[in-house]
Image (cartoon, rainbow, N blue to C red):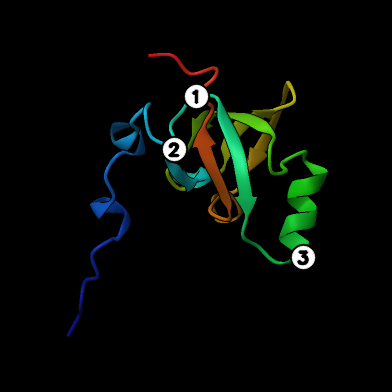
Amino acid sequence: MIHHQKSHFAALPDAASQLDPDLNNFMTLSIAPLNVPLIVESIDSGRDARSRLTSLGILPGMEITILTRDHDGPMTLTVKGTKIALGRGISGKVLVSVNQDLHKE
């Protein structure tokens, strides 16, 4: 007998539709909206992942912007004016918020 599991990702609402500019919303980088200035709030990872993120300039307080995101693969983002690719797994360890000072709707 074959059992089909439902994808948990299909049940997730679009992150951009949940953003309220008047609230301080935190989300993982993996679901954050595209082309919106974000601030890294924290990194929830082990030493190796934290070291990799640090070497890429992804630290709490830094501003980043997601340029592209593939559903199955890496995302492209800018950090300090440099484009980098970041895998979906490690991006789920980075907690971000919308930079309210720069994001105007």
Percent across and percent down for residue 105 are 37, 14
Q: Earlier in the sequence, mark 3 or mark 1?
A: 3
Is disc 2 surrounded by few (<14), some (14 to 19) or many (20+) residues within 10 Å?
few
Q: Earlier in the sequence, mark 2 or mark 3?
A: 2
Query: Label 2 near label 1: C-beta < 8 Å?
Result: yes
Percent across and percent down for residue 85 are 65, 38
Instruction: Quickly name the residue at label 2.
Output: 24
Label 1 amino acid?
Gln
The residue at 77%/41% (across/down) is 56
Query: Label 1 near label 3: C-beta < 8 Å?
Result: no
* Residue 80 figure quarter: top right
Label 3 amino acid?
Arg
* Residue 99 figure quarter: top right
Q: Which mark is residue 100?
A: 1
Instruction: Quickly name the residue at label 3.
Output: 47
**Is there any visible trace of residue 73 in the rendered image?**
no
Query: Horizontally, is 15 left or right of 37 in the view?
Result: left
Label 2 amino acid?
Asn
The residue at 54%/19% (across/down) is 101
Query: Horizontally, is 84 left or right of 71 in the view?
Result: right
In front of the other: 84 or 64 = 64
